Amino acid sequence: MRNRWLTTLIALTTIPAAAAAQEAHSPYAHEGSEQLKTLSQQEVDDLLNGAGMGLARPAELNQYPGPRHALELADSLSLSDEQLRAVEGTFADMQCRAKALGRQILEAERALDAAFAAGDMTEAALVAAVTRIADLQGELRAVHLRAHLATREVLTRHQIYEYDRLRGYAAEHDHGSGASGHDG
C-alpha cells in the first residue's frame, strides 16, 4: 500500500514537471507573427517597413552616418538645404528598395515554410529556398549600407563628427580621423 501511494505521489509531481519541461523545450511555439509563423511580428514589421534591423552597423559604427538618423539630427548637424534634399533622396530610395526586398524575403520565407508544412521538402528544394532567402537578405543589407555611403558623401567632416557625438560614438573616434566627408 505504501509503495502504491509513493508511486502515485511521484507520478503526480512529475507530470506537471514534464509538461513544464515540454513547454520550455518549445521556444518557437509562440514566436510567430499573424502573417508568418516562422518570423516574429517585429521581424515581419521591420521587413515591411524597410527598417535597418542593425544591417548597417559596420557603417554606423565607423563614421558612415545613416540617412534616417541624419534626418532626425538635421538641425543639430546644421544640414544645408542641398544636403537635406540629398539625404532625403537617399533615405527615400533606401526605403523603397528595402520595402520591396522585405516583401520578397517574406514571400520566400512563406514558400520555405509551406514546403516544410506540406511534407515534401527535398534537399535540392531546401538549398534553392535557403539560397534565395540569403541572396535577398544580402541585397537588403547592401541597400542599407549603400545609403550610409551616400549619406557620408554629402556631410562634412565636422558633421560626421557631430553625428557620431550625438549618437554616442564620439569616444570611439578622434575628431576627423578616418572621416572622408567634405571639408568645411
Image (tube, rainbow, N blue to C red):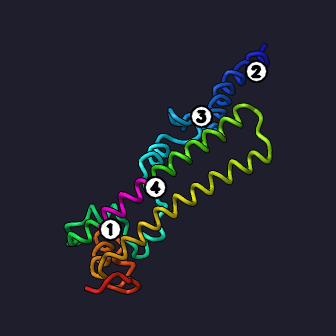
Q: CA distance from mark 4 to mark 3?
A: 32 Å
The C terminus - image quarter: bottom left
Task: Identify residue type, mark 2.
Answer: Thr
Percent coordinates x, y for residue 97 in the rendering: 46, 55
Percent coordinates x, y for residue 120 in the rendering: 77, 35
Q: Give the answer, above or below, for where 98 lies relative to 83.
A: above
Left or right relative to 33: residue 172: left
Looking at the image, is mark 1 or mark 3 earlier in the sequence? 3
Front position in the image: 96 or 55? 96
Front position in the image: 11 or 53? 53
Q: Are marks 2 and 3 in contact (CB under 8 Å)?
A: no
Instruction: Say which mark, if any, is on residue 17.
Output: none
Residue at coordinates 72% horizontally, 31% vertically from top-left? 118
Q: CA distance from mark 2 to mark 4?
A: 64 Å
State the extent of the magenta-drawn residues as a range.
86-98
Q: Circle 2 sits on which residue?
A: 7
Percent coordinates x, y for residue 25 in the rendering: 65, 38
Q: Which element is circle 4 on?
A: helix
Looking at the image, is mark 1 or mark 2 earlier in the sequence? 2
Q: Which element is circle 1 on?
A: helix
Q: CA distance from mark 1 to mark 4?
A: 25 Å
Q: Circle 1 sits on which residue?
A: 167
Front position in the image: 174 or 52? 52
Percent coordinates x, y for residue 76 in the rendering: 21, 69
